[in-house]
Image: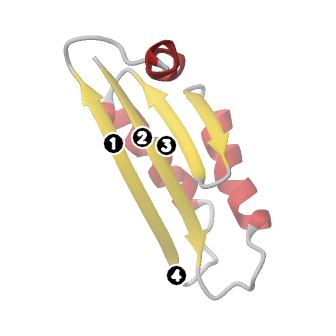
Amino acid sequence: MSAMAFVSITPLGEGESVSEYVSRAVKVIKDSGLEWTLTPMGTIVEGEKLEDVLTVITHAAEELDECDRLSISIKVDYRKNKPIGLETKVKSVMDKL
């Protein structure tokens, strides 16, 4: 089993640049021990259990508790029959190019 989530957590009403806030949320993900990759539009998090991935996302959002409003987008790929692997999905597409 494995779960992979693409998540974007953005505070609203905190000004034009939000990298200070985003970096704090990403640090929570980094410190979780799960596999992760930062992209310009969000962060990909991977774990063996869906619960682990969603818990880390929840903790990342809670890190920005002082923000009155957050926009959170999550897209999840949850597989019970085989591990996903951050690199496996990309390699599969690149091999076909």
Q: Where is residue 41 in the image (x, y as percent from the top left)?
A: 60, 55
- The residue at 67%/36% (across/down) is 30
Q: Which of marks 2 and 3 is in front?
A: 2
Q: How far apart, in angstroms, are the residues tagged by discs 3 and 4?
A: 19 Å
The amino acid type found where label 3 is placed reads: Val
Earlier sequence position, callout 3 versus callout 4: 3
- The residue at 43%/61% (across/down) is 73
Pick whichever, 17 or 21, lies toward us.
Answer: 17
Return the residue found at the far left: 81
Q: Mark 4 points at which residue?
A: 69
The amino acid type found where label 4 is placed reads: Arg
Q: How far apart, in angstroms, are the residues tagged by discs 2 and 4?
A: 21 Å
Q: Do the residues labelled 1 and 2 touch (CB within 8 Å)?
A: yes
The amino acid type found where label 1 is placed reads: Val
Q: Mark 2 points at which residue?
A: 5
The amino acid type found where label 2 is placed reads: Ala
Q: How far apart, in angstroms, are the residues tagged by discs 3 and 1?
A: 13 Å
Residue 67, compared with residue 36, is above or below; it is below
Q: Position of residue 8 (x, y in %)?
A: 53, 57
Q: Residue 76 carries which label?
A: 1
Earlier sequence position, callout 2 versus callout 4: 2
Residue at disc 1, secondary structure: strand
Q: Name the residue under label 3.
A: 56
Q: Which of marks 3 and 1 is in front?
A: 1
